Amino acid sequence: MKSNNELDRRSFLKASIVAGGALLVGINLPMASRAEDRFGFSAEPDADFSPNAFIKITTNGKVTVVVGQSEMGQGVLTSLPMIVADELEVDWANVGYEQAPANKAFINPVMGMQGTGGSSSVRGLFNPLRKASAQVREMLIGAAAASWGVAADTCKAENGKILHSASNKSVPYGELLAAAAKITPSDNPTLKDAKDFKYIGKAVKRLDTPAKVDGTAVFGIDVKVPGMLYATILRSPVIGGKVKSVDDSAAKATKGVVKVVDLGYGVGVIADSYWNARKGRTALKVTWDDGPMANVSSETIYKSFADAADNKKGLEAKKIGDVAAGKSKAAKTIDAVYWAPFLAHATMEPINFTADVRSDGAEVWGGVQAQMLVQATVAKTAGVPVDKVKVNTTLLGGGFGRRFEMDYVIDATLLSKAAGKPVKVVWTREDDTQNDMYRPATYNKMSAGIDAGGKPVFWHHRVVNDAIMARAGKAFGFTLKDDQLDSSSFEGANELPYNFTNFQCDWVRVDTGVPVGFWRSVGSSHTAFSVECFMDELAAAAGKDPLEFRLSLLEPNSRHAGVLKLAAEKAGWGKKMPAGSGQGIAVAESFGSYVAHVADVTVGADGKVNVDRVVVATDCGQVVNPDTVVAQMEGSVVFGLTAALYGEITIKDGKVVQKNFPDYKMVRMNEMPKVEVFLLPSKENHGGVGEPGTPPIAPAVVNAIFAATGKRVRSLPIRPGDLKKA
């Protein structure tokens, strides 16, 4: 069976001459047919060819890579062009990018849709882009060879030219476009040897940096459309609440307000400026139907999880051996409960979207992670054909899974349709914090035992939380059944690298009514915390060093062991620490990459935790741009550390308590530890880098706190009051 990254014989490269004399080439992926079924696209080929990942070469030799992925800080607008530049043999100075429209041709093979998430861009597109670029290179060589009357294998491509050394002839790519377009590309082009890479594996400056520095970069919040109006929406303070009645007379009388729209789930105010829309919203008088969530609180949710852990039958996620038999051999048993709270995404760019809905179609603008889903959602909401919806993807001021959601897309589409004009919807920070699709809160019931020699004889992990795919799965075309596993809820807990003879992981699903969604590193964001902290508890019970204990349970040459050893070496693991300070270690695999963290932590007498240094070791397979990998690992530490120290969404009477950064804190600059990142050289397949750096930081810090104080932290966020000295 072919992998998603391979092309079958029907998925051939196409080429044509487009306006201005440019050669336009690209690839079509077999995943397109699945997306057509899911999102309603026609199976017929487009009149204007739009490939999955295509290359434009102009007569002056400039190469433009049209990128179907979203740029949200992870560097995809540079890494994908790097792949093309290397295989196509062109000067990096002549390479640029364009953001692709929404179209089935731009499907990410890993995801089966045009979307950016799961750290999948390079993983999904590395091989297809290389093949497409190699095909183009061979077409250009063939065109030059034919014009000179020589064999193609006597020519080579180099720095944007075709060379024939025997005759000392050369011709730039720009002069070969018409002839190259007539050549049928090879099904099996010869790819460059990795040792000949010029860009792949080297640190390359990002192509999108200059525009971000000089202010010309366009994010969703920057979009301006002629005749555009602005809108904001008043939503129910209770999760899932609906509008019962609305008095909008004062709002309509507010200067600049154009229209007030009852959306059912909220009331939209459309005005000639954002601030006038805000003033109109303040003037609204709405009576709400709170619905069933009015009696829900964080306390009732925790209790329901605890009850389910003890009394509800779970679904088996993984089983090895016999846990009951292992328990009978245990000289010592350790039991613990680990708690991870709901978390918001808190993207730095406020949630926003702009839509222009007309009777014959629609055009939309915004930072999104799933263009095809946006296109289908707008079409359904506006009542127009899918192929009449144009999606313009802007830069994203933070995604983390939040911009995979369609709520803000629906907002703008409905209000533009009601106004008959383009409308930009802007959420306040409070709107976003209190109406997010949160990282699921998770209750982890842990039990493990060791024999007299300190060797583990059983491990049982029961994960209790809500199912992300129960809601989000509908967008992907399926419904999660009661007896069906949702791996995104427990991933990282069921596939441990440690050699346990008797192992069991089961999952208990509890519907809390709180909307949950994808959050950076998804399930691993909370399972790494429970697993790696409990591993430290097991090591302590066995009287073993936490690093040596882990290594004793890993295959010696495993990738987990490799990053653990590298991180420990660079961090000076085992060094003498000052009083009140300690080192902690943790490792996790997610999205195909392996990451270990060592944290140096100091705990003050007041219980305040200062993270002084974090050493990161990562094995993410073959690296395209190491500078991007380092940046993503550093950013993951910030993101994960914020969650560990401060992150918590709490519910009271069905309402989200937190509103803005004063009560949903971020790590500040003066709190940032020194972060050192080390890449383990690897020839393995590409792993992700946007998400895998987040899971190990919380357990590394918590384990360091134990080393410093002797106190276990089993509930996040870390609370200084629990660590304060008497």
Image (spheres, rainbow, N blue to C red):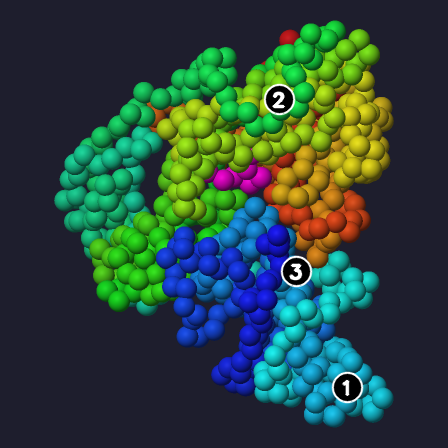
Taken as a whole, is the magenta stretch helix, strand or loop? loop
* 1 sits to left or right of 380: right
Residue 518 part of the magenta segment = yes
Q: Quadrant of the C terminus?
A: top right
Which quadrant of the view contains residue 82? bottom right
Q: Helix, strand, or loop for circle 2?
A: strand
| Amino acid marked by disc 3 | Asn
> For the image shown, how many numbered marks are present on the structure?
3
Q: Helix, strand, or loop for circle 3?
A: helix
Image: 504 above or below 228 = above
The Cα atoms of the two marked residues, 2 and 3, are separated by 37 Å
Question: Which span of residues is magenta-colored?
Answer: 516-523
Closer to us: 565 or 323: 323
* 150 sits to left or right of 101: right
Residue holding disc 2: 504
At x 39%, y 30%, the residue is 514
Q: Earlier in the sequence, mark 1 or mark 2?
A: 1
Looking at the rendered structure, which numbered label has been put on residue 151? 1
At x 49%, y 54%, the residue is 113
Q: Position of residue 431 (x, y in %)?
A: 37, 40
Q: Position of residue 254 (x, y in %)?
A: 20, 49
Looking at the rendered structure, which numbered label has been put on residue 127? 3
The Cα atoms of the two marked residues, 1 and 3, are separated by 27 Å
Which quadrant of the view contains residue 162? bottom right
Q: Position of residue 492 (x, y in %)?
A: 62, 32
At x 31%, y 62%, the residue is 385
Residue 192 in view of the camera: yes
